[in-house]
Image (cartoon, helix red, strand yellow):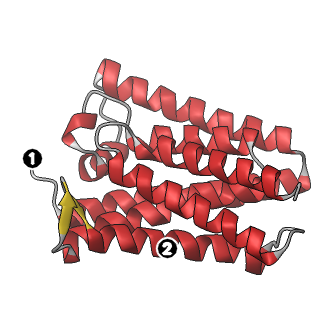
Amino acid sequence: MTYTFNQELARKFVHFLSVFIIIGFLLISHYFTKQTALLTLTAVLAIILFLEYLRIETGKKIPLLSSLWSHVMRTKEKDRFGGYVFMILGSLIVFALFETRIAVAAILMATLGDLAAALIGKRFGKHFFMKERAWEGTLAQFSIDVLIGILVFIIFSPFAIPLWQTWAIILAMSLTATIVETLIYKMDDNLIIPVFSGFVGEIALLVLSKI
């Protein structure tokens, strides 16, 4: 089956729902505790894993979900976990391990940055430098990742560190997310990007805050 631009658009729209994961996690953390938010996200992951069991192991056709799966899943995911599983798992890992703002930025870079790279690259990509990788998509992703860093770390919730240090974190995370997205073909970037970019951001924050 040829994976068309419209299918890619539908797939990325589903991944955009990670924004609701962030909003839900922040609200539960605010009104209850971070541990409660982590447990809630784990419960969501467990439900998704059960639905994947029905789809992969038993071949059950679930109304509405079956139609959605047919539009957003790649051929290689027919008998494997869908990208949404790794998206939730990646969100759970970064929220559990990293500073909340770092986690939020890492998830958004994995979702919106990847969306920009895929859609811009597929629709406007003309200058390819690697297999299925166009400069137009790569530069679009890096630009979106930097914008995400500005919004999260400078506009909405600034770090209590000098501005140049904040910019260093933004650029380090954006560059990491872009490089990972560019190099990854077979592994799932919904998990790899937030873990790597979040780890780099967390290390950068720890180091720079000591200066």
How far apart marks 2 and 1 lie (CA) works out to 30 Å
Residue at image coords 48%, 39%: 86
Tell me if 177 is positioned left or right of 151 in this view: left
- Comparing 198 with 127, the one in front is 127
Q: Which mark is residue 29?
A: none
Q: Residue under label 2, please give it.
A: 144
Q: Residues within 10 Å of mark 2 (few under 14, many from 20)?
A: many
Q: Position of residue 205 (x, y in %)?
A: 77, 55
In the image, farthest residue toward the top: 57
Q: Nearer the viewer, residue 165 or 119?
A: 165
Q: Amino acid at mark 1?
A: Met
Q: Horizontally, is 163 left or right of 16 in the view?
A: right
Q: Is residue 194 above or below residue 118?
A: above
Q: Residue at x 24, y 47 (%)?
A: 70
Q: Name which residue type carries label 2.
A: Ile
Instruction: Name the quadrant containing residue 196.
Output: top right
Query: In what element is the residue under mark 1?
Result: loop
Label 1: few (<14), some or many (≥20) within 10 Å? few
Reply above or below: 77 against 166. above
User: What is the x, y in percent for residue 137?
Assistant: 31, 69
Closest to the observer, 104 or 2:
104
Q: Which residue is mark 1?
A: 1
Of badges 2 and 1, nearer the viewer stands 2
Asked if residue 19 shows in the view, the reply is no
Q: Name which quarter of the figure residue 60 lies in.
A: top left
Residue 178, image x and y in percent? 44, 59
User: Could you tell which of marks 2 and 1 lies nearer the N-terminus?
Assistant: 1
Residue occupying the point 61% across, 45% down: 91
Q: What percent of the width, then of the height, locates residue 18? A: 55, 56
Residue reaching furthest left?
Answer: 1
